[in-house]
Amino acid sequence: MNSLSSLCLIIVTTFTFTGKEDANKFEDVEAKFEAHFHPRNTEVIDSYKFQARNQVPGETLEQFITDLKNMVKRCNYGDQTDRMVRNKIVFGVSDTRLKERLLREQALTLVLAVTLCNAAETTSNNLLIMQNKTEEKLEINALKSRFRSHHDKSAEKNEPKERKQFDCTKCGTKHLGGQCPAFGCTCLNCGKPNHYAKLCRTKPNKIQQIYEEDASQLVESNEAKSLFLGAVQQKGHTRKLVTVEINGQSITMKADTGADVNVLSLKTVMKLGLMAATTKEGPDLYGVSDEKIEHLRRVRIKCFYKQKPHHYSERKPV
């Protein structure tokens, strides 16, 4: 405080008062100190600041115009004050479209300029509100759409799926899952279970091999297009032979091979006197690798084994 008092005493000596008694008045001394430490800006500086003033980002038009009206008071423009504020509004607004709108007015006054600015700002605020509501609505619709999509997917998962038939590689037919007729059957080609020999992926042995797909699939009429044989004959492998009686003559044959279609040579057919009973009509015959087996004729005969009659069909190869 002592240093400040010394400085103040020095400054006081520079003050000029109207009368000697004014130097002892607190109000007069305070006014002198106020003028010394806060000098009034000059008219030139105030005019420069006014002319350099432009609307800044984030500032509303109302704030910008109010600040211009306060600044122009210190510029001493006199009766040109309204014109200077009007011009500064046109030059200083940041909205290019609003500036173009103001410049189109032939008799633009300060009042009209302020009115146009207020209208533009109100319109801009309303558009922003509408845009925000539209965006909120779009966001809500997007959320609803995602919810419906998730709900539909969950519903699809919960709904029992319709079972469809497919082409089976085990039996060669089309059926539902778990209903393969080859399940439990043994392949006559590889000896493995659950598939037919005609669809076996194991290479067939180099033997004279023909097969029957399924006894239930054989048709004794001439309407069937193809048949398969199940008899297998391999070199070095013997099977039990039996003697049966056909057309009053005895003939040695293999025991049941599991086939429903059997073959006899032409010589055997003629020996048994069956040629007259044969017919050319009948389905085609195919082997294990799907190659067609040529045969001459077809005949249904009656044979006796241990004096018991049996019926079966024969095909005689070329």
Image: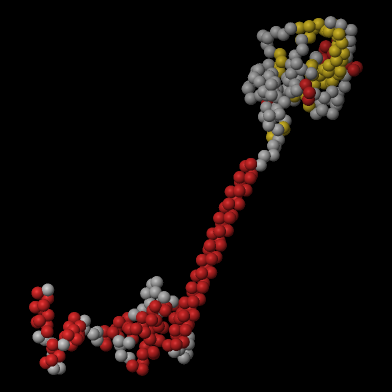
Q: Is residue 35 left or right of residue 292?
A: left
User: The N terminus is located in which quarter?
Assistant: bottom left
User: Which quadrant of the structure image shows residue 161?
Assistant: top right
- Residue 244 x/y as whole percent: 83, 7
The structure residue drawn at horizontal position 66% and vertical position 20%, both measured from the top left corner, is 193
Q: Is residue 204 visible?
A: no
Depth check: 304 or 179 in front?
179
Q: How is the image coloured?
A: secondary structure
The structure residue drawn at horizontal position 11% and vertical position 92%, both measured from the top left corner, is 20
- Residue 252 x/y as whole percent: 80, 7
Above or below, comparing residue 279 to residue 156 in the picture = above
Above or below, comparing residue 314 to residue 47 in the picture = above
- Residue 254 x/y as whole percent: 76, 10
User: The C terminus is located in which quarter?
Assistant: top right
Q: Is residue 288 left or right of residue 116?
A: right
Q: Is residue 76 left or right of residue 117?
A: left
Depth check: 178 or 74 in front?
74
User: Which quadrant of the structure image shows residue 242?
Assistant: top right
- Residue 22 x/y as whole percent: 15, 90
The structure residue drawn at horizontal position 47% and vertical position 83%, both measured from the top left corner, is 116
Q: Is residue 277 left or right of residue 210?
A: right
User: Which quadrant of the structure image shows residue 223?
Assistant: top right
